[in-house]
Image (tube, rainbow, N blue to C red):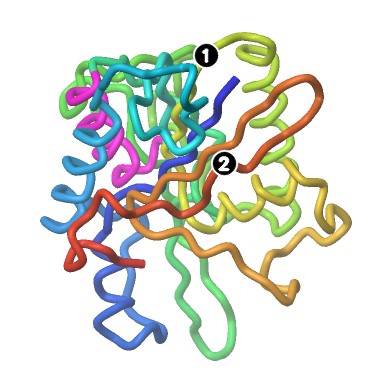
């Protein structure tokens, strides 16, 4: 199994964060892509769709210099991820399947502090009707709630680590031991949990922000992990060489 993590394209929140000098900013609970994000997804889709003849006697193609050959494509149900995944699906011809568990840390919510007290909005994300109208080709393993896929509120701090474990177990159950090449469109914060679970790093610490390191993951960047014979190989991380310089964002 080859596993490709793909971060979504630049969202409205990402753009505001970058424009504000990476400081706190007004955010949307489930932001769409910017025009830059759409372009990034198009470049990523074209890159993932490319195919050239592979001379197996010369290389095992650890850098995908000849092809990717994706067989499966999953996506978070946050709007920016589904937009990114839809574009990549159209470019590669690989159907896009919902994997709600790879959503960003916290879920769909807004926080408002009033007199020192935090108030969390109660939102539910996209509904079946919303996805059917805007992303008719998106496939679902399991139906989602009529009011939306998200449970409402902000998830507990301990939840992302558990989700990462469940996601990795799901992917292994479905694809380990096969020649499947699996793409997963996810988010920067949650990707850090996935890396920690893959390599068994500080699993006792439930919060990324309490650790003295961070795995940067640019918008629409690619990271490849190969799972063979009980061994995991990190082929590359945060690959953006297919993007023009002006489209490399964080």
Q: Earlier in the sequence, mark 1 or mark 2?
A: 1
**Residue 63 percent coordinates (x, y):** 45, 38
The quarter of the rendered structure image containing the C terminus is: bottom left
The local secondary structure at tag 1 comes to loop
Residue 95 vertical position relative to residue 196 in the rendered view, above or below: above
Q: Which residue occupies 49% across, 18% down?
A: 57
In the rendered structure, does residue 85 fall within the stretch colored magenta?
Answer: yes
Residue 97 lies in quadrant: top left
Looking at the rendered structure, the number of numbered marks drawn on it comes to: 2
In the image shown, does 224 or 115 lie closer to the viewer? 224
- Residue sitting farthest toward the top: 178
Residue 214 vertical position relative to residue 185 in the rendered view, above or below: below
- Is 152 left or right of 212, judged from the image as shown? left
In the rendered structure, does residue 113 fall within the stretch colored magenta?
Answer: no
Q: Which residue occupies 68% across, 72% down?
A: 213
**Residue 139 percent coordinates (x, y):** 35, 15
Q: Which mark is residue 180?
A: 1
Region of the chain picked out in magenta, as a range = 77-92
Residue 33 vertical position relative to residue 208 in the rendered view, above or below: above
- Is 18 left or right of 105, judged from the image as shown? left
In the image shown, does 70 or 98 lie closer to the viewer? 70
In the image shown, does 56 or 155 lie closer to the viewer? 56
Residue tagged 2: 235
Q: Which residue occupies 46% across, 54% down?
A: 238
The residue carrying pointer 1 sits among few (fewer than 14), some (14 to 19) or many (20 or more) residues within 10 Å by Cα, namely: some
**Residue 18 percent coordinates (x, y):** 30, 78
């Amino acid at each position: 199994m080859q596993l490709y993590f793909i971060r979504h394209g630049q969202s409205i929140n990402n753009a505001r964060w970058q424009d504000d000098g990476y400081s706190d900013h007004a955010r949307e609970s489930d932001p769409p892509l910017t025009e830059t994000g759409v372009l990034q997804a198009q470049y990523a889709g074209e890159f993932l769709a490319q195919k050239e003849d592979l001379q197996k006697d010369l290389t095992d193609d650890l850098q995908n210099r000849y092809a990717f050959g994706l067989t499966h494509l999953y996506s978070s149900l946050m709007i920016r991820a589904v937009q990114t995944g839809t574009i990549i699906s159209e470019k590669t011809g690989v159907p896009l399947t919902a994997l709600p568990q790879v959503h960003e840390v916290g879920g769909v919510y807004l926080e408002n502090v009033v007199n020192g007290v935090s108030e969390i909005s109660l939102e539910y994300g996209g509904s079946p009707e919303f996805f059917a109208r805007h992303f008719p080709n998106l496939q679902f393993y399991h139906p989602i709630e009529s009011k939306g896929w998200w449970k409402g509120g902000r998830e507990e701090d301990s939840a992302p680590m558990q989700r990462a474990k469940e996601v990795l177990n799901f992917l292994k159950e479905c694809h380990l031991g096969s020649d499947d090449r699996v793409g997963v469109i996810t988010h920067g914060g949650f990707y850090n949990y996935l890396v920690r679970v893959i390599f068994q790093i500080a699993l006792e610490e439930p919060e990324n922000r309490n650790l003295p390191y961070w795995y940067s993951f640019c918008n629409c960047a690619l990271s490849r992990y190969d799972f063979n014979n009980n061994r995991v190989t990190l082929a590359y991380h945060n690959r953006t060489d297919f993007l023009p310089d002006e489209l490399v964002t964080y």
